[in-house]
Each structure stands twice: as C-alpha cells, then as structure tokens.
Image (tube, rainbow, N blue to C red):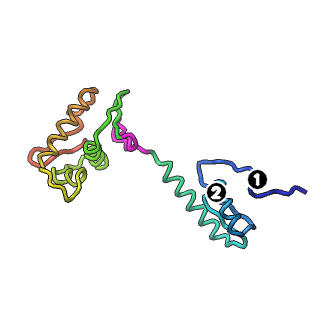
Amino acid sequence: MWLVNPFETAVIHLDGGCTSRAARSDKSDVVKGLDQGADDYITKPFDERELTARVRVALRRTEEENQPKTIQEGPFPLDLESYSILYDTHEVRLTLKKFYIIEAMMNRPNRTFTREDLLQVAWEYDTFTEVRTVDSHIRNLRDKLRKSNFPIEEILLTVWGIGYKWR
C-alpha cells in the first residue's frame, strides 16, 4: 500500500488554478497547502456543490486572466499592457493620454466623441483643462502614427463642429 503525503504529491501546473481537497483540516496544514501553491483549500467533510462552485470560480478567474490584452479594431491591435498600437511591423508607443483617447475610440468604433467626452476619458474630472487640449493631443497622435505609415487619415476622422471618430 502506498502512503502518500498530500504535500509531496505531484501537482500538474495548468493554466487554471489549483484547489486542494484534503482530509487534513488543521490550520497549519491549510497554511502549508496554500503556501505550496494551492489557490484554495477545502477540508473534509465538504459539500460537493461547494467544491464544484469553487472550481467554477477558479476556472472563471483563469479565463478572465487569459483574455487577450489587446483591442483589435481592423488590422490595428492596441496593446493594453505596453500602451502601444501595432501597424504592419511597427509598434508605436503612446503616452497615457493618447492611449486613453485611442482606447476609448477603438472600443466604440464609428461613435463620434465630443471633445468633452475625450476630456472625461483621458483627464480627471476635477482638472481644469481646456477642451482644445484634445485637439492638440489628436494632432500629435496623428503625427506620431503617420511616421509609421499608419493610414491615420482614413481611420481617425474629424467630425467638424462635434469632435472625432475612429472608423
């Protein structure tokens, strides 16, 4: 008969979490299990529905963590972790304000954003910023993307008298 120490058993590392189910309910065993990599620890006696629910939560959390960290609108992925946009092989790094502006527009393509909308997206509500500051950031954003041969004139449109839209 094999005697198995639950803390020495092999753990298969998947993209998902690790829930440990054990007969050992001493707090030191729970702490040891969590310290050795378990995301959750449930002791006997346990309710099977609770165990199933805990596994579903771990899987849901893993699915959320594995979601792509980009916004893809057309052939232009916006990388949410590096604050950059890709076009062909060019990666264009964006300042935080420009990133917030382009992220909002890519999340809602074909929506016309007023300057006030973009101010709320990129600046804090309680800052005193002129609405024409948005125009300056849009101009700089266009210049920066144009240097990478990004077809900015076809994508980031000015809607005269209203604001801007991403097509």
Of the two numbered discs 2 and 1 in the rendering, the one whose residue sits closer to the viewer: 2
Does the magenta run of residues contain 76?
A: yes
Cβ atoms under marks 2 and 1 closer than 8 Å: no
Residue 57 falls in which quadrant of the image? bottom right
Q: Is residue 105 above or below residue 56?
A: above
Residue ID for mark 2: 35
Between 96 and 158, the one nearer to me in the picture: 96
Residue 42 falls in which quadrant of the image? bottom right
Q: Helix, strand or loop at disc 2?
A: helix
- Left or right: 117 as drawn, with respect to 32: left
Q: Helix, strand or loop at disc 1?
A: loop
What's the residue at 60%, 58% (across, down)?
39
Q: Is residue 129 above or below residue 146?
A: below
Residue 151 locus on image (x, y percent) = 25, 31
Residue 145 locus on image (x, y percent) = 26, 32
Check the image and name the residue furthest to the left: 161
Residue ID for mark 1: 8
Does the magenta run of residues contain 161?
A: no
Residue 109 locus on image (x, y percent) = 27, 46
> Where, quadrant-wise, is the C terminus in this rendering?
top left
> Which residues, given as a range, are shown in magenta?
69-82
